[in-house]
Amino acid sequence: MPSVSAHTAVTLAAHVDHVFGVMGNGNAYFLDALARQTSATFTAVRHEAGAVVAADAFHRASGRLAAATTTYGAGFTNTLTALAEAVQAHVPLVLVVGDEPTSGPRPWDVDQIAMASAVGARTYTVGRADAAATTLIAVEHALTYRVPTVLAIPYDVATVDAGPVPETSAPRLPAPLAPRGPFAEASVRDVAAALASARRPLLMAGRGAWLSGAGAALGAIADATGALTVTTALGRGVFPRPEFDLGVAGGFGAERAMDLVRQADVAVVVGASLNQFTMRFGELFAPGTRVFQVDVAPAATHPHVGGFVRGDAATVAAAVLEKLDGTTPSGWREQVDVTAARQYEPGDGTAPDGRLDPRSAAARIAELLPADRVVVSDGGHFLGWANMYWPVASPDRMIMVGTAFQAIGLGFASVLGAALARPGSTVVLTTGDGGGLMALADLESAVRVAGGRGLAVVWNDGAYGAEIHVYGRKGLARDPMLIPGVDFAGLASAAGACGIPVRSLDDLDRLGAWAARPADERPFLLLDLHVSPSVVAPYFEEIGRANS
């Protein structure tokens, strides 16, 4: 007899192929139905936060709807930080959870709907007569608004007979937002006219441009106008001509590249929110730059924007391109040495305290990494090193789970989602010692799922680097900012991986040997980098100046 849990599982499985989670008594019947009655794959994690994190990373690497599941109560509350991150990052995800009985809460129940709402996620609760329809509504909501939804199964209806599982229609999703009306059309003309007359035009693209498929049209606009290009950290690889791309804007950018950005007289920003880090706390563009923004947000998202077009990135880019027919390229991009401008500081090999210079380590690792790679990043001071020194081919190959919500400790579980989304690629995790310890429960999960396609780089500096470089400089007590020495290489070995302590650049030769072996013949590798806490990432210098 098909139960409410079966209706939920079968309907959801028509739209997802992977579900990540931890089994408990609130979702046991859902997982049983998922395994017995659908073709979806269930991947177990060791901490409930890891279930949402893995699903989040799976979406970012594949573009497909993500799904996770936990039990009620503590199982659900353990997901809240990861759920808040997915909300902030606009990740379409369905989290299936157990919930209190319809008869009312038990002594151990909490108001899960209120908790989900507090972090920005809507809850849909299934019932005996509407489980399949409610599941479809949750899927539609997640895809339409690009946010997580919580799908709750009350404890006392999970096993209730609901009759045959009904056929459900495909989700109805809105068409791409197009600029309409005379004001919007005039704004598109203004963008095209400004680019056509610019002497030093610049295009910037973010993750929104990638999601809409605007890359080709933006590349054609850059060719037509002779524009240099630059991206946000989450938009790397959007533009098809890397020889004219200045890399990442903001604190992750090379200094000479950012100097060129400030020389632009017209800048058109597409599918990027222009947060404080991308904008270098207001210093990215020069005061005389005319800045236009194209986004689906209701209004411009930064005060330096002078012209705004609301619409889908690809739709607006195509309209602008049409109006540039016959435009003469500015010639600016042929006059500058983009390769030289993108160079970063190579570091000194070893810092004065005798530990590795993280810049030198990052540069050497970049030389040894497999070309076919996905980089997944935890949050923390070390963020700068991977973003600066490890190029990726496209935005779905740089996955930063935690940065939207300013969280750390979500790294190891990200490996699972990326590995299953990109089964032919090497997944490279970059994490710190603080976040690495928070996420340690899912080190085993990463090793088990990624195997020889998994590599973790732990920037082990014995400190919470972000706090050291901001509050330590202000004279606050340093002891709470420090972490006793941790043998991450030993922890990795205990979890079935190959852990290598790295105290010199020569120790990284082991990475080269590992990368040269076939993936199915090598173990998961963890590099325990003993780096100096005294070397500050440039983007953190910007944060320090902004906070001073």
Image (spheres, rainbow, N blue to C red):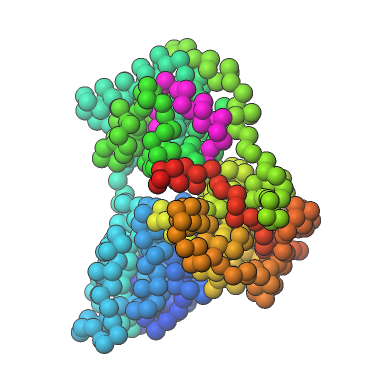
- Left or right, 487 with reference to 185: right
Q: Which residue appears farthest toward the bottom when viewing the image?
A: 107
Please determine whether, in this image, residue 136 is positioned above or below residue 198: below
- Left or right, 344 with reference to 312: right
Q: Position of residue 405 (x, y in %)?
A: 39, 56
- The residue that appears at 48% across and 28% down in the rendered structure is 261
- The residue that appears at 37% across and 67% down in the rendered structure is 80
Give the quarter of the image for residue 420: bottom right
User: Residue 243, can we see it?
Assistant: no
Locate the N terminus by quadrant.
bottom left
Q: Where is residue 378 in the image (x, y as percent from the top left)?
A: 52, 58
Front residue of 313 and 244 = 244
Query: Is residue 289 part of the magenta span, yes or no?
Result: no
Front residue of 352 and 206 = 352
What's drawn in magenta, residue-wise?
A: 252-269
Locate the C terminus by quadrant.
top left
Q: Position of residue 524 (x, y in %)?
A: 68, 65
Front residue of 548 and 147 = 548
Q: Where is residue 143 in the image (x, y as percent from the top left)?
A: 35, 53
Give the quarter of the image for residue 154: bottom left
Front residue of 9 and 258 = 258
- The residue that appears at 20% across and 84% down in the rendered structure is 103
- The residue that appears at 72% across and 67% down in the rendered structure is 498
